[in-house]
Image (cartoon, rainbow, N blue to C red):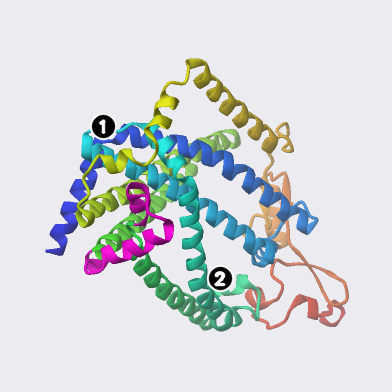
């Protein structure tokens, strides 16, 4: 019986998506373009702050981790989370409106959707703030538990030792982290099920954000298991599809690269792969988000019984949509030109510090470390034989100030010794 309900919901959602595909795709492209203008400068600014905080031009993974765990780093991650959720919910709002319009009247257009979504933007922002605050409040004790119980198990030695050797302490730490995250996921799934109708209620019933969450929970009551099962089925499907695409992509890249011997051809092919990968990622994310919202709209219709077109048309004053439609052609050309100038300006701002005139260089990471032991003369000599332009090695400083060519901060991974380089005197080892 449960499988039948899932099959019906999926078939209905798939039919809705096919019927409104072009408006859905158009709305997604507009949101993606605006998102790029917001996200790209934000990421560039955060990366600039990261580099400036270290005073270096090259950063190690530990320095990046230290930045992310700092106060400003945590704030940056939260900021990115809020922006990401805002874009996702704004996309969901538009998708839901298009889908419901298509179901009710057989007609869906982008312009009314944009106007209606912008009209409800302050309420959407408040809803996002409430949801993020609750999620962070719930996650805090779990993150504290991970920090207290798991991190001490993997901080005695360099992290690369644990990643390479996977000792019992590492397995225990992973088990603890996985257990905490699993419980947190179950709680979030429960909350998501309770709040699954919050966005459509905000859009179509025009309820206040707090009331949307309460009303959604009331409507879901008695149907929670069925809705949770459908959402969990969707989540597992997304994870499986994403994993399969990732494995196939890695296999395909490895296969293609195995036939390349010319450096310029390899660079060109890698560039093509990056572009294709970007389009595939956009397509997959579009399908994932649209499919979820199509299912939510169907759940909304079943639970509320609201099939009226008026619930959609009432999202924004009709006069606003009418005035927008009556804008002269010159205004639309002006908006398009402004967006183009803004896009070019932001791109120039991001690329201006980058020197695009330098030649492509081959740098051997820790020497030719795939064929010889890393950071050794054997790896260095092999990299020279393979015509590497530069060789990258890692250095540590011993207790008496001697420079040691080694990646890790201790000798646990490479020699099995429980000693940190900073505690060893080079003179005493000779």
Seen in the picture, residue 261 relative to 251 is either above or below; the reply is above
Label whose residue precedes the other's in the sequence (2 or 1)? 1
Examine the rendering and report whether any part of residue 193 can be seen: no
Q: Are marks 2 and 1 in contact (CB under 8 Å)?
A: no
209 is within the stretch colored magenta: yes
**Residue beneath label 1, please?**
107
Where on the picture, by quarter, is residue 388?
top right
* Residue 104 in the image, given as x and y percentages of width and height: 22, 39
> Which residue is the extreme one toward the left?
1
Examine the rendering and report whether any part of residue 96 can be seen: yes
Q: Label 2 to label 1, Cα distance in Å?
A: 54 Å
- In the rendered image, the quadrant that contains the N terminus is bottom left
Asked if residue 49 lies left or right of residue 250, the reply is right
Q: Main secondary structure of the magenta part?
A: helix
Q: Residue at x 56, y 28 (%)?
A: 339
- Provide the residue span drawn in magenta: 198-226
**Residue 163, which numbered label?**
2
Of discs 2 and 1, which sits in the foreground?
1
390 is within the stretch colored magenta: no
Q: Residue at x 60, y 37 (%)?
A: 263
Where on the picture, by quarter, is residue 70?
bottom right
Asked if residue 200 lies left or right of residue 209, the reply is left
Nearer the observer, 379 or 56: 56
Nearer the observer, 221 or 308: 308
Callout 2: helix, strand or loop? helix
**Residue 343, which numbered label?**
none
Asked if residue 216 lies left or right of residue 305, the reply is right
Using a 10 Å C-alpha cutoff, classify the residue at mark 2 as few (fewer than 14 neighbours), some (14 to 19) or many (20 or more).
few
């Amino acid at each position: 019986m449960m499988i039948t309900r899932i099959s019906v919901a999926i078939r209905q959602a798939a039919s809705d998506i096919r019927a409104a595909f072009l408006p859905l795709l158009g709305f997604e492209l507009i949101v993606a373009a605006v998102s790029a203008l917001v996200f790209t400068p934000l990421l560039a600014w955060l990366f600039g702050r990261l580099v400036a905080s270290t005073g270096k031009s090259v950063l190690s993974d530990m320095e990046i981790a230290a930045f992310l765990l700092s106060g400003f780093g945590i704030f940056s991650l939260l900021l990115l989370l809020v922006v990401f959720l805002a874009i996702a919910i704004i996309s969901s709002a538009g998708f839901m409106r298009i889908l419901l319009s298509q179901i009710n009247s057989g007609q869906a257009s982008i312009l009314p959707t944009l106007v209606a979504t912008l009209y409800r933007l302050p309420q959407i922002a408040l809803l996002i703030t409430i949801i993020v605050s609750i999620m962070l409040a719930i996650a805090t004790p779990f993150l504290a538990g991970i920090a207290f119980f798991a991190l001490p198990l993997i901080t005695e030695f360099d992290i690369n030792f644990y990643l390479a050797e996977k000792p019992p302490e590492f397995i225990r730490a992973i088990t603890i982290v996985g257990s905490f995250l699993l419980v947190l996921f179950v709680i979030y799934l429960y909350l998501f099920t309770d709040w699954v109708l919050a966005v459509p209620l905000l859009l179509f019933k025009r309820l206040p954000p707090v009331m949307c969450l309460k009303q959604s929970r009331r409507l879901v009551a008695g149907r929670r298991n069925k809705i949770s099962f459908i959402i969990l089925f969707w989540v597992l499907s997304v994870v499986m599809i994403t994993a399969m695409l990732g494995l196939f992509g890695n296999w395909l890249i490895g296969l293609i690269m195995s036939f390349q011997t010319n450096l310029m051809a390899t660079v060109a092919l890698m560039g093509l792969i990056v572009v294709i990968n970007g389009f595939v990622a956009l397509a997959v994310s579009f399908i994932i988000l649209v499919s979820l919202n199509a299912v939510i709209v169907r759940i909304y219709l079943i639970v509320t019984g609201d099939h009226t077109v008026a619930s959609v048309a009432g999202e924004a004053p009709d006069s606003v949509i009418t005035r927008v439609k009556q804008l002269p052609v010159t205004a639309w050309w002006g908006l398009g030109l402004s967006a183009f100038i803004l896009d070019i300006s932001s791109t120039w701002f991001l690329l201006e510090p980058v020197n695009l005139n330098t030649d492509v260089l081959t740098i051997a990471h820790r020497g030719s470390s795939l064929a010889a032991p890393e950071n050794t003369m054997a790896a260095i000599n092999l990299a020279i034989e393979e015509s590497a332009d530069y060789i990258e090695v890692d250095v540590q400083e011993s207790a008496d100030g001697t420079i040691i060519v080694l990646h890790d901060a201790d000798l646990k991974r490479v020699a099995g010794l429980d000693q940190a380089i900073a505690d060893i005197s080079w003179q005493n080892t000779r």
